Image (spheres, coloured by chain):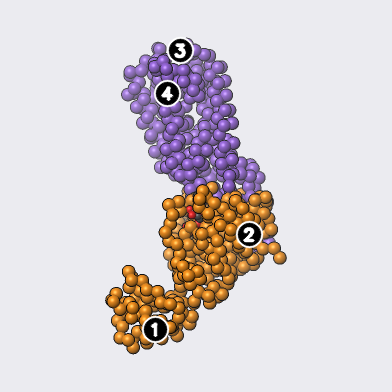
Chain colours: A orange, B purple
Amino acid sequence: MEHIVEARGLTKSYGTVRALAGLDLVARRGRVAAVLGPNGAGKTTFVRAVATLVQPDGGSLRVAGFDVVRQPAHVRRVIGLAGQSAAVEDAMTGRENLEMVGRLFGLDRAAARAATTAVLDQLQLGADADRLVRTYSGGMRRRLDLGASLVGSPRLLLLDEPTTGLDPRSRIELWDAIRAMVAGGTDVLLTTQYLEEADQLAADIVIIDQGRVIAEGTPSELKSRAGRDVIEVHARDRAALPLVAEALRGLGGEPRVEIATRRVAITVDTGTDRLMDAVRALDSRGIDIEDIALRRPTLDEVFLTLTGKPVDTAEPQDRRRHPAA
Amino acid sequence: MTATTTVATRPGAGLAPSAVAVALRTIRKFVRTPQLIVVGTIQGALFLLIFRYVFGGSIGVGGLPYVDFLVPGFVTTTILFAGTGAAAGVAEDVEHGFFDRLRSLPIPRLSVMAGRSLADTALLGFTLAVTTAIGFAVGFRVHTDLAASLAAFGLCVVYGFAFEWMFITMGLVARNAQAAQGLSMIVFPLTFVSSAYVPVATMPSWMRPFAENQPITVMVDAVRCLTQGSRVEALLPHHTAYYVGMSLLWTVALIAAFAPVAIARFSHR
Ligand SMILES: Nc1ncnc2c1ncn2[C@@H]1O[C@H](COP(=O)(O)OP(=O)(O)OP(=O)(O)O)[C@@H](O)[C@H]1O
Ligand SMILES: [Mg+2]
């Protein structure tokens, strides 16, 4: 069976910056794929290539079997794009925005109206549909933007960092909306900087950095490789940090000490059990701590575990945000 | 959400419907941002008043009242001032990803540019009408017939459509509203080194050949001739038909130069 997205050795450079450096990525039909990566990893460039907005320099990229370079018009009939910035018109109402996009998808007036109402209800924007988008909150704008990519009933939905900048509640609402779409049969390719988001939404996760895939698998595969949870101890005293690290050693991976924030973190497999062990170990040594927490690993920690090196946070000069071609 | 599963591919809208949808959005944006309209109108009125009453006293134009000389020039150059807003609007659409969405849709790329330029031209028509009305309010009078005056107004709208392509191109190149505004301001000197506000004959001789033949002068003089008739023709080296013909040639040249660039730039990936 052909894949919904299939990239082979995809390359794209901007001057000396290699945004995509031979990316191999397959998104399967009927599953949500998440592309996970830090700032500047090439996520947006990849999504824009899939959306026919950026012409790759080399390699091949097929969407629903169509070649993005040779058959862009076919690809555009299949996709719906919600880019990194919410591309909705402030001076129109939510309903007008969606009807406009519906019309552009080739729906007649009645069909555009019907699809708009359905999407607004689905995204729980029905009550605010006739307000100007100018008055929307950030979360509502995002949901409307999602709706705009949806009114044309695309086969493949492309979501570039759909929840960046949202508060936790809006994020969860948006996740629910995405799940509902997936249940309706839409294939989704999304990008994110949050491991948790990929974990929540995706069946397959591809971690990329500097335009290359560095790890891929199902969430549970990646987690079993990267460790499920992280125990983090906030020491009261900087001098106690080596003792804390010593106490935690042996419970999981190698303890990571962060002197500036007086924290020691360790990746473990069975979180709650190990948390008890950690508390006991600290207690038996009489170490004073500020607090201790069990949490999900961050993308940085997954990186560290999978690649043995931290995310390259030093942003070169030219790594600003680029809105368009 | 049953539609999601059943529809495989969408045909996409044709050229005309998608151009209309894009144009409608630009017009709605303008109409629903009253600040834009109010500030724009006040600004235009203020400048017209300054030119009319501050400079007007010191500029004599061969027996023609300065207000009759000025208003055709002022209305014509309004096109360029309004154009900076259009350039900024286009740049904003690039910046905020709106064009990305449009370019990802199954519609002809030309339709976005066509819709944008037509809508901006329609809005310009409104601005020109307001400016003309203010002109009449400060004493401007037509000395030809209604048909000629309407032709003059129509000519301004046609100029506007032609210049629109230049401003769209600037917006697409700048990709940032402020930069676009800055870039489009480079046309302002062109309005001053023209017959728009003062007769070219009063300029130094080295400047005159340029000032006499550059498009703004030709366009302004066409409008001036059409609204003032022989009173103005007597002051100019050519007849009305020459200026109208030349100005139309310039509009064709502007469209030929910038429309392909704008469309190519928009479609580029
Ligand atoms: N139009 C462009 N011109 C120049 N460089 C670009 C352009 N687009 C992207 N880049 C560069 O390509 C690299 C990848 O950028 P991209 O936007 O794809 O990253 P990203 O993973 O989406 O990052 P973020 O999480 O910040 O959105 C960056 O170094 C960026 O500076
Ligand atoms: Mg990005």
Instruction: Tell whether label 4 touches label 1 (CB within 8 Å).
Output: no
Cα separation between marks 4 and 2? 57 Å
Which three-letter amino acid code belongs to the residue tagged 4?
Val
User: Do the residues indicated by labels 1 and 4 lie within the same chain of the protein?
Assistant: no
Cα separation between marks 3 and 2? 71 Å
User: Mark 4, mark 3: which one is toward the viewer?
Assistant: 4
Q: Which residue is mark 2?
A: A8
The residue marked by circle 3 belongs to what chain? B
The one of B149 and B180 positioned closer to us in this rendering = B180
Q: Which residue is mark 3?
A: B235
Q: Quick one: label 2 or label 1, which is nearer the N terminus?
A: 2
Label of residue B193 in the image: 4
User: Mark 1, mark 4: which one is toward the viewer?
Assistant: 1
Q: Residue at x 59, y 31 (%)?
A: B256
**Identity of the residue furthest to the right in this view:** A1
Q: Which residue is mark 1?
A: A278
